[in-house]
């Protein structure tokens, strides 16, 4: 492989050519292609990480363009899924890197497949239920988890390594999230860039063998109020179900949730089907809604202010409500059980 494009990176003492070779042989999973995920993927691809597996369940909208660096107005007009739009841009940046794009949801059903052959998992999600699932899956398999979160002008980041550091559950107890999201409290782009850069930096340290340089803290900051704080990652919490008891609660859920409220999005995701024939549903829903069809999804806009977004993998976004009961009523009315 020609490493000439990485010449400036290889001049950096801790990386050099040996570190660059390690990056080329590495594979990472980036969960989410939104604000954090698009910046993370951009930096990893330009750095020459050999394989990027990218999964995202959403499509590009106008409000994304302020901070989600891989997307443009054409992606919005074409309603391109974020994973597909990201893959298109990333492959034009670096043809030496393999980019695998998955339009879908991270769930109990696909964690084994998603984590197969992966060296580090990077968090670009917007909810703690998915983060806890990733945390548990990573710690069960011995894979580092690069956590990041951002809202408003605040951010936090930590690099969790099984058997070395505590896990996310040790630091952020289930149910302890503030409830604020970018869609309710807003967000400024520089805060996103800082969190993503910390996530990638710790990942590069790990992948190039510079483990002694890892920060080993939970970093929090408010870029607007000029505050920052580092909390040392020391002992694991003995009461943690993952680190203390090796129970991995997110991997042992007996009930599969079919409805997921996308906080602050006025949207409920319903996933009851294994797959959907978009051609069939385009014809079926045309009598009741205004239809927009793309190669990846189908939009159905109803006069009552409700909109469906149907994906080939069987997911339906019911937009216009955050009430799961109302979403199910609409879903059952037009799609059925």
Image (tube, grey):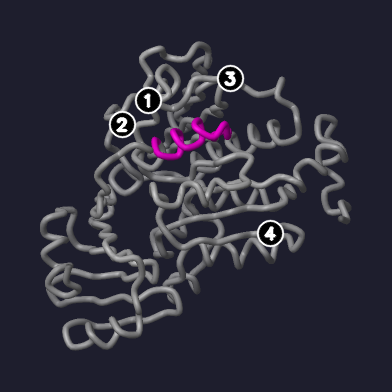
In the rendered structure, does residue 209 fall within the stretch colored magenta?
no
Horizontal side of residue 320 vs 119, given as left or right: left
Q: Nearer the viewer, mark 2 or mark 3?
A: 3
Indicate which disc, 4 or 1, sits on the residue closer to the N terminus. Answer: 4
Indicate which disc, 4 or 3, sits on the residue closer to the N terminus. Answer: 4
* Circles 1 and 2 in contact, beta carbons < 8 Å: yes
From the top left corner, tell me how far across and down residue 135 is, in percent. 45, 34
Q: CA distance from mark 4 to mark 2?
A: 35 Å
Indicate which disc, 1 or 2, sits on the residue closer to the N terminus. Answer: 1
Which residue in the protein does label 1 denote? 172
Label 4 sits on a secondary structure element that is: strand
Q: Nearer the viewer, mark 4 or mark 2?
A: 4
From the top left corner, tell me how far across and down residue 99 is, in percent. 64, 59
Label 3 sits on a secondary structure element that is: loop
In the rendered structure, does residue 135 fall within the stretch colored magenta?
yes
Which residue in the protein does label 4 denote? 98
Q: CA distance from mark 1 to mark 2?
A: 8 Å
Q: CA distance from mark 4 to mark 3?
A: 30 Å
Which labelled disc corresponds to residue 164? 3
Magenta stretch, main secondary structure, is: helix
* Circles 4 and 1 in contact, beta carbons < 8 Å: no
Horizontal side of residue 327 vs 275, given as left or right: left
Say above or below: 43 vs 155.
below
Circle 4 packing at 10 Å, graded few (<14), some (14-19), many (20+), is some
Q: Which residues are magenta?
A: 132-145
Which residue in the protein does label 2 denote? 177
């Amino acid at each position: 492989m020609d490493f000439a494009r990485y010449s400036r990176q290889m001049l950096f003492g801790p990386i050099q050519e040996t570190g660059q070779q390690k990056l080329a042989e590495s594979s990472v999973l980036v969960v989410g292609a939104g604000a954090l995920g698009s910046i993370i993927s951009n930096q990893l691809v330009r750095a020459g990480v050999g394989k990027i597996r990218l999964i995202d369940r959403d499509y590009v909208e106008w409000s994304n363009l302020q901070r989600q660096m891989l997307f443009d107005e054409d992606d919005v007009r074409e309603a391109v899924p974020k994973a597909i739009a990201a893959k298109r841009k990333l492959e034009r940046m670096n043809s030496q890197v393999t980019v695998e794009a998955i339009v879908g949801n991270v769930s109990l059903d696909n964690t084994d497949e998603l984590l197969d052959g992966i060296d580090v998992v990077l968090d670009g999600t917007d909810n703690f239920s998915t983060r806890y699932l990733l945390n548990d899956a990573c710690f069960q398999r011995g894979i580092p988890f690069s956590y990041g979160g951002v809202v408003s002008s605040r951010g936090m980041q930590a690099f969790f390594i099984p058997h070395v550091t505590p896990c996310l559950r040790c630091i952020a107890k289930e149910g302890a999230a503030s409830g604020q999201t970018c869609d309710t409290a807003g967000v400024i782009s520089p805060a996103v860039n800082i969190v993503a850069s910390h996530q990638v930096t710790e990942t590069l340290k790990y992948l190039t063998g510079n483990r002694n340089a890892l920060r080993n803290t939970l970093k929090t900051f408010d870029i607007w109020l000029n505050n920052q704080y580092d909390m040392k990652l020391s002992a694991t919490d003995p009461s943690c179900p993952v680190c203390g008891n090796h129970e991995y609660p997110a991997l042992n859920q007996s009930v599969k949730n079919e409805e997921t409220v996308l906080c602050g999005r006025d949207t409920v995701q319903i996933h009851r089907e294994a797959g959907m024939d978009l051609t069939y549903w385009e014809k079926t829903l045309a009598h009741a809604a205004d239809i927009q069809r793309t190669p990846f999804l189908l939009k159905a806009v109803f006069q009552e202010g409700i909109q469906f977004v149907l994906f080939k993998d069987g997911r339906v976004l019911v937009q216009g409500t955050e009430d799961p009961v109302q979403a199910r009523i609409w879903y059952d009315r037009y799609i059925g059980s």
